Image (cartoon, helix red, strand yellow):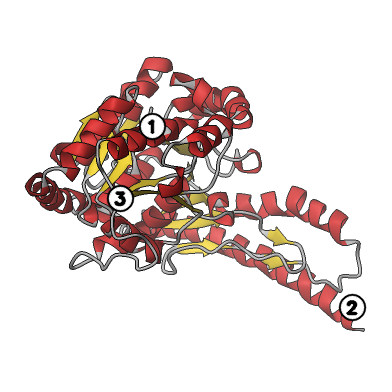
Amino acid sequence: MASVRSTVRFFAHVGRDLLGTLRARVRRTFDWVVYGVDEVVVGVDVFPFAETLTGVGWYEWNLLDALDRRDDGLRYNLYAHTFLAPGEQPPPVPGRRKMRLRVHEVPAGLLLPIRPTLWLLRTFVEPVLCFLDGNDVFFAPNFMPPHRHRRRGRRTVLTVHDLAFTAAPELVGPETLDDMRSRFPRSLRRADRVIAVSEATASDLLEHYEFDRRRVHTIHEGLDPHFADLREAPAPDPALPDDYLLFVSTIEPRKNVVGVLRAFALVAEWGYRGQLVLVGRWGWRTEAIRAELESSPVRDRIIHLDYVGRDRMAAVYAGARALLFPSWIEGFGLPILESLACGTPVVTSGRSAMPEVAGPAGVYVDPESAHSIATGAASLLDDADHRARLAALGRTRARRFSWDEAARATANVLRRAAGKRPDGPETYRV
């Protein structure tokens, strides 16, 4: 009997959801025709929230959180899997005012076979629910809509974070490269508007693809609230050494970790007695990086931490003498912004989007030269006054990057894509 009750209850909930969504669609149409209510409904891909948040995930989280605080006539339907297997957890989502994530968990005691039922619900019922949602535009914050979300809105807006897969394909994992090469050009052609997170990414987009410049909007990212809310420099992490240089990112070829390791060996040879702390999970094609790490003449002075949560990262940044971030290519470079907010100077590449973020607070180096990276680090280690000046510049610089302003511009791009008049700028550059 318990199985019968749970099965009936589950399908009754799904039926009520279908009817309620249909009523909401009819009411919205009535309000538009009779009262001229100018509401825009946006579907959003939130599959990045199903994994541990890194760059793209934090971008989307902070952006949606800021969009939820706005009173601008937009509301949002968030899409991952609508129907979940027994015990499967829905992804966490930000915002409560204007964000809705529809979730139905199939009960463990369902009378029908669970896997076929789940497939049928996701294949046939989920698209009906999404159609009834009546999205005016679909927002894909992670380059392109997932396969299952390709037709969840009449118009599409994409966020492009970088063009590494085109500009430097040797730095991108093979699975990601194949997926982007096969699907991204088609998604780009179908997109009504594209958001680039930096002018460097916008320029790469226009260089490598035939795309109307008027449909590309540069919107800089903001400073994560974990760092924006700092009123003073946090205390250093007591679990780390008193004196260290820092690297933060996924450990993969694009981040030039080999250059960081070789530069650290040089500054140690020149007399630096501190350590190097690497923060980040191992990524793809790490053989050369691992070999460089294990063969380093100062291997015993290199500490590797895996993923570190937001609450701890401010202290990790604050305790470092400098952040070494000489990537080959970046769409934005959030670790730069976070480090500056904590008063830690940044040694970074003078190319791609990195100068857009660091501005006058950065020490710029040639990523192809370990000697150049080491010289940049040494310029900070040897001159406390220079380091203090850059720390003050960095804090001021970092606080100019606002998620509220990024959300304002993004909302206007979404309105434009939906055929509505924007109420302000559709770009945001610091």
Q: Residue at x 64, y 31 (%)?
A: 175
Q: Is residue 408 visible?
A: no
The residue that disc 1 covers is: 262
Quarter of the image containing the C terminus? Answer: top left
Q: In this picture, is 349 found above or below 276?
A: above
The local crowd at label 1, few if under 14, some if 14 to 19, many if 20 or more residues have their Cα within 10 Å, is many
The local crowd at label 3, few if under 14, some if 14 to 19, many if 20 or more residues have their Cα within 10 Å, is some
The residue that disc 2 covers is: 4
Q: Amino acid at mark 3?
A: Gly
Q: Residue at x 39, y 23 (%)?
A: 205
Q: Is residue 239 visible?
A: yes
Q: Nearer the viewer, residue 49 or 265?
A: 265
The image quadrant that residue 317 belongs to is: bottom left
The mark tally for this picture is: 3
The local crowd at label 2, few if under 14, some if 14 to 19, many if 20 or more residues have their Cα within 10 Å, is few
Label number found at residue 274: 3
Q: Determine the CA span between mark 3 and mark 2.
A: 66 Å
Look at the numbered disc 1 and give the secondary structure of its residue: helix
The image quadrant that residue 308 belongs to is: bottom left
Q: Determine the CA span between mark 3 and mark 1.
A: 15 Å
Q: Residue at x 37, y 16 (%)?
A: 207
